[in-house]
Image: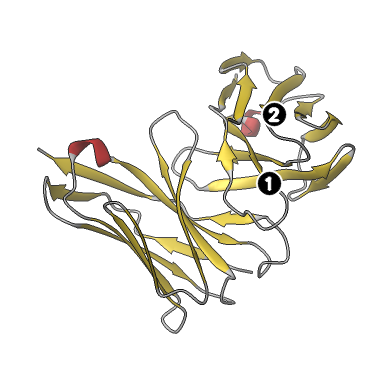
Amino acid sequence: SQTIHQWPATLVQPVGSPLSLECTVEGTSNPNLYWYRQAAGRGLQLLFYSVGIGQISSEVPQNLSASRPQDRQFILSSKKLLLSDSGFYLCAWNQRGGRYEQYFGPGTRLTVT
Amino acid sequence: SQKIEQNSEALNIQEGKTATLTCNYTNYSPAYLQWYRQDPGRGPVFLLLIRENEKEKRKERLKVTFDTTLKQSLFHITASQPADSATYLCALDGEGGATNKLIFGTGTLLAVQP
């Protein structure tokens, strides 16, 4: 069966510090991968998605970047965090070829202080 | 751009009753619509997908309807239980089915009282 991992689970970082969140998927190959952010009381905002290694599409101009160095690994990064980067970050995957439902990881709670 | 509206007020119902949640969208008719459940501090969990040519979909105690004329989907939980208490998210395909990108609503919190 497929599983998706995210780490760390929680993170407290000062403003101006770098960020690296990692997501890995097991039990599947060639997945579509997604990064979302969920602010308190708001819906899920799609940040990045990827259909393959090195292929990243950015949805919202922001202080973040994403990379996909391996087929089942997706990384969210920032060089300098802002207070507004605080939120709940979720990684998700789905299978290419007509299966549209997405499967989410456990999330990372990021607090920028 | 596509917008999704879900009732932001919490829905409180008594155990055993049927819970009905609403999802309205404002722009183009999506190729499909999905419902997810999210518990506090957890990632959403996929529940049901309904396509534009389907009127109704069922899974155990769950039922989803899709009315493209009203631009609305209804999500029903019959014989509700306290364990059904969670936030339920509606999601639509972001580009008319051209990609796998989803647009999510803000969700409706359901509280089932014992």
Confirm or deny contact between disc 1 and disc 2 (CB under 8 A).
no
**Residue A16 showing in the rendered view:** no
Q: Nearer the viewer, residue B59 or A42?
A: B59
Q: Residue at x 68, y 46 (%)?
A: A95
Front residue of this view, candidates A107 and A27: A27
Return the residue nearer the eye: A43 or A15: A43
Type of the residue with mark 1: Gln
Q: How crowded is mark 1: few (under 14 residues within 10 Å), some or many (20 or more)?
A: some
Residue B74 appears left or right of A96: left
Give the structural element (helix, strand or loop) at label 1: loop
Comes first in the chain, label 1 or label 2: 2
Q: Is residue A66 left or right of residue B16?
A: right
Q: Is residue B59 left or right of residue A55?
A: left
Q: Name the residue under label 2.
A: A82
Disc 1 sits on a residue from what chain? A
The x, y position of residue A83, in whole percent, is 63, 28
Is residue B20 visible from the viewing direction of this image? yes
| Residue A13: % across, % down | 65, 15
**Residue A111 falls in image quadrant:** top right
Residue at point 47%, 79% (across, down)? B68
The chain holding disc 2 is A
Local secondary structure at mark 2: loop
Residue furthest bottom as drawn: B69
Residue at numbered disc 1:
A95
The count of marks equals 2
Above or below — where is B58 with respect to B25?
above
